[in-house]
Each structure stands twice: as structure tokens, then as C-alpha cells.
Amino acid sequence: MDVQAIHNLIDCAKEHEVHSRQLHSLVSQQLEQLHHTIELPEDMACETLLKFTNEYIDHVPNFLEALDKASAELKIEHFISPFLSIAEENFLAPVLQAEAETGLFDLLDKAYFAHRLIEEVNDSYLAKTGSTLIPMNMTWANLIIHAILGEEFGNELDKIVEQTVQQMMRSHEIYNDRMFKDFVNNRDTELWVNTWSQWNCLSSRMGIELKFTSAA
């Protein structure tokens, strides 16, 4: 997985945003569309939400790399790697398509796809085994970005993610794989949680950013 290429693309997109302010415009327009339970500080609503979208995009390469390393340590990379490859390929699509200028505005849906893909894999794993694969909750972060992207586009991406995961689960028969069954049956839960504790800074960053209250 070429994490550095993802970092480089994000850095270039940030430079583009300085001049285009496309993401800033989108966030400003979508402030009123946020879920009613999400609170933003009245005097810094746009700035707070814009900072969150930047953090959300920044989080992608770190999150994918963390998941890649954690799955390798616990020897389930054969299960995780196909999904990481899809997320990486989709995120780097502007580079692969030789698009000259890519801004943060263009990467927001790519970031949403990556986060939602892993969330869907997590949900599928929970339904099959009764426990989460990744001990972190991405739901609130994804709900906020869904609102920013707009209901129609967000739902379209959700549908693509769900179909992708279902198709891969069927085609690879992952849950019937002997090695994967061994992992489910013999997994050391404490070890798995401890493995992810190394990356707590990533999840906590998202959690802090989700506390959109006046006190925060």
C-alpha cells in the first residue's frame, strides 16, 4: 500500500484549497443540512466544521496504514488487504487518471468512501461473529461528512460501498476461510485491543472533533 502517495495527494490538495476555497464553500453551504443532534459553536461553526473535514481527509492514510499493520500483526491481512486496496485505488483515482489539479473538495468523497468501506466491513464482521473487528466507532464522523456531501450523493456512495463489501464477501467466501475461522475462534481479544491502542491518537482525534458543543 502506497501510503506516501496518499499523503502527497492530500498535501497538493491543501495547496489547491488555499486558492480555490472550494471545500470552504461547500462546508458553508451545508451548515444547515447537518444532523439535528450535532451542535456547533455559534461563533465558529464554519471554522469548526471545516477543520473537521480536513482532519477527516488527513485521517485516511494513517487509518489505512494502522489497519494494515494491525492486521499483519494478527495474521489476518488476507481478509483486510483486499478492502485496503480498493480504498487506496479509489482515493488515488485522480492521480491514476492524471488529473492536473485535485483539491480537498475532490478528495472528500474519496475519504468518505474509504471510511465507510471499513465501517461496512466492521458491521459485516459484527453481524457474523458478534464482536467488532476494529474497536473504534466511525459512525458519527461518517454521518457528518454524509450531511456535507448531501443526502443524494451520500446515499449513492453508501450504496456503492454496501454492494462492494457484499460482492467481495461472496466472491472470496472470506467467512468460510479456514484461517479466518481460526482467527475468529482463537482471537485474543485483549491482544487485539492492545494492538489498536497503539493507534488511539487517531481515533481520539476523531472523537474530539466530533464533540461539537459550545463547551468543547
Image: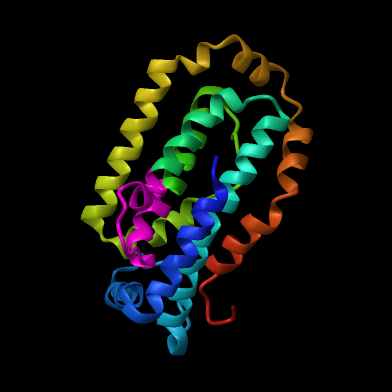
The answer to whether one can see residue 144 in this image is yes
Above or below 161: residue 214: below
Horizontal arrangement in the rendering, residue 198 relative to residue 127 (left or right): right
In the image, what residue occupies the spot 67% across and 14% down?
182
Residue numbers of the magenta segment? 90-113
User: Is most of the magenta stretch helix, strand or loop?
Assistant: helix
| Residue 41 x %, y % | 48, 83
Above or below 165: residue 38: below
Please identify the quadrant where the C terminus is shown: bottom right
The answer to whether one can see residue 38 in this image is no
Horizontal arrangement in the rendering, residue 2 relative to residue 30 (left or right): right
Q: Is residue 108 magenta?
A: yes
The quadrant holding residue 159 is top left
| Residue 144 x %, y % | 40, 62
In the image, what residue occupies the spot 55% across and 12% down?
177
Above or below 8: residue 96: above
In the image, what residue occupies the spot 72% across and 24% down?
187
**Residue placed furthest toward the bottom:** 43
Q: Is residue 18 magenta?
A: no
Please identify the quadrant where the N terminus is shown: top right
In the image, what residue occupies the spot 52% across and 76% down?
213
| Residue 23 x %, y % | 34, 72
State the residue in front, 25 or 146: 25
| Residue 40 x %, y % | 45, 77
Horizontal arrangement in the rendering, residue 47 relative to residue 198 (left or right): left
